[in-house]
């Protein structure tokens, strides 16, 4: 390869993890859709199907991961994943269901829940408040984020099954309240072009939710906490700046000015895997995207990712993604039709 590991390290931004976060979020090709934006008078309940069922209902390809979210504009809800305890989500808060379990959103008891599928196919909201109880009703916006390339994505694998976010509290790393307020305004007015604007705002909303999670050191763990570690975060930044670099533990340790043994122990303690296991997983994530989105040959992709031996690349790819590179490419082409 013409580019050495040390050259890659020298061109890496020392400013922290911002470029890494952009790289990993961008790799998921995030989009979104608002599904429900209504008021509900207690007692009420709506059942939300699993991520797989939502994907089918929305007629999306099998490579898309659907993540349901709920933003409480007024009142509160009880969110109950199947087989789990309820979580109370209050006004100004969001719940994002990365785990993909079927769940129920409700308030009070006494009436049978309706399915989100029935509401999405034109069914009437039976819990619509009247003039007498509108002030006491719950106002709820529900939607989905659509994510791609989540296999081997370190960000996605580090997210909790349900992320509970104080969405109207500004932070140092995010402007979540600003994005939400803009989206609420667009959804309420539905001016010319609002649908397009809301779709773009949903992309920003997901990004701001993830940045808010990164900022919250009390809940962020795994990959997120590793990014915030000055040593581990620097090493991750080096890897993402040049995934095809000739990385070894020694060279990564050299880049963070630490002995190889201490660096390897610190990296593994933060991320739960060795530095070279992380390098390989991210290379395979990049390879999967290139096979699905580019016309590069398998040999060219292998070389770009640091593999001089195509057979070795193929073995690593199959070990991590379950099929050979050529089969993966064929499946991606079929899914996109």
Image (spheres, helix red, strand yellow):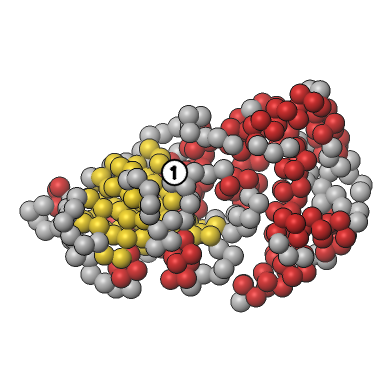
| Side of 324 where 93 appears, left or right | left
The structure residue drawn at horizontal position 65% and vertical position 36%, both measured from the top left corner, is 271
Name the residue located 58 percent from the left edge and 47 percent from the top edge: 157
Residue 218 location, x and y as percent? 48, 29
Which image quadrant is residue 110 in? bottom left
User: What residue sits right under mark 1 in the picture?
Assistant: 163
In which quadrant of the rendered image does the C terminus lie?
Answer: bottom right
Residue 11: name its quadrant. top right
Query: In front: 131, or 321?
Result: 321
Residue at screen point 58% across, 32% down: 225
Count of all numbered marks drawn on residues in the image: 1
Q: Secondary structure at mark 1?
A: strand
Above-or-below relation of 319 to 256: below
Q: In this rendering, does residue 190 appear at all?
A: no
What residue is at 82 percent from the left and 47 percent from the top? 244
Residue 105 location (% of width, % of height): 30, 53
Q: Eyeballing the image, is 202 above or below 112? A: above
Left or right, 330 with reference to 181: right
């Amino acid at each position: 390869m013409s580019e050495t590991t040390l050259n890659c390290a020298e061109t890496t931004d020392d400013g922290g993890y911002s470029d890494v976060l952009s790289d990993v979020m961008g790799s998921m090709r995030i989009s979104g859709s608002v599904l429900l934006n209504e008021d509900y008078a207690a007692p009420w309940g709506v059942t939300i199907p699993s991520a797989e069922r939502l994907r089918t209902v929305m007629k999306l390809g099998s490579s898309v991961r659907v993540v349901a979210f709920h933003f409480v504009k007024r009142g509160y809800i009880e969110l109950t994943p199947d087989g789990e305890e309820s979580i109370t989500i209050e006004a100004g808060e969001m719940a994002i269901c990365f785990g993909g379990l079927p769940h129920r959103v409700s308030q009070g008891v006494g009436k049978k829940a309706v399915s989100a599928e029935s509401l999405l196919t034109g069914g009437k909201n039976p819990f619509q408040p009247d003039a007498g109880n509108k002030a006491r009703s719950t106002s709820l916006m529900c939607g989905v984020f659509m994510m791609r390339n989540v296999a081997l994505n370190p960000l996605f694998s580090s997210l909790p099954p349900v992320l509970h976010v104080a969405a109207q509290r500004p932070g140092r790393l995010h402007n979540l309240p600003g994005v939400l307020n803009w989206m609420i305004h667009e959804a309420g007015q539905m001016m010319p072009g609002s649908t397009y604007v809301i779709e773009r705002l949903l992309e920003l909303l997901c990004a701001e939710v993830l940045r808010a999670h990164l900022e919250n050191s009390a809940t962020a763990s795994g990959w997120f906490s590793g990014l915030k570690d000055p040593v581990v975060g620097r090493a991750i930044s080096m890897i993402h700046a040049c995934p095809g670099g000739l990385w070894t533990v020694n060279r990564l340790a050299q880049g963070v000015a630490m002995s190889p043994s201490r660096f390897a122990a610190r990296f593994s303690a933060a991320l739960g895997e060795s530095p070279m296991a992380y390098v390989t997983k991210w290379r395979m994530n990049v390879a999967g995207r290139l096979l699905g989105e580019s016309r590069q040959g398998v040999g060219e992709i292998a070389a770009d990712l640091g593999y001089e031996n195509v057979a070795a690349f193929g073995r690593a790819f199959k070990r991590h993604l379950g099929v050979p590179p050529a089969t993966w490419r064929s499946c991606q082409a079929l899914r996109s039709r």
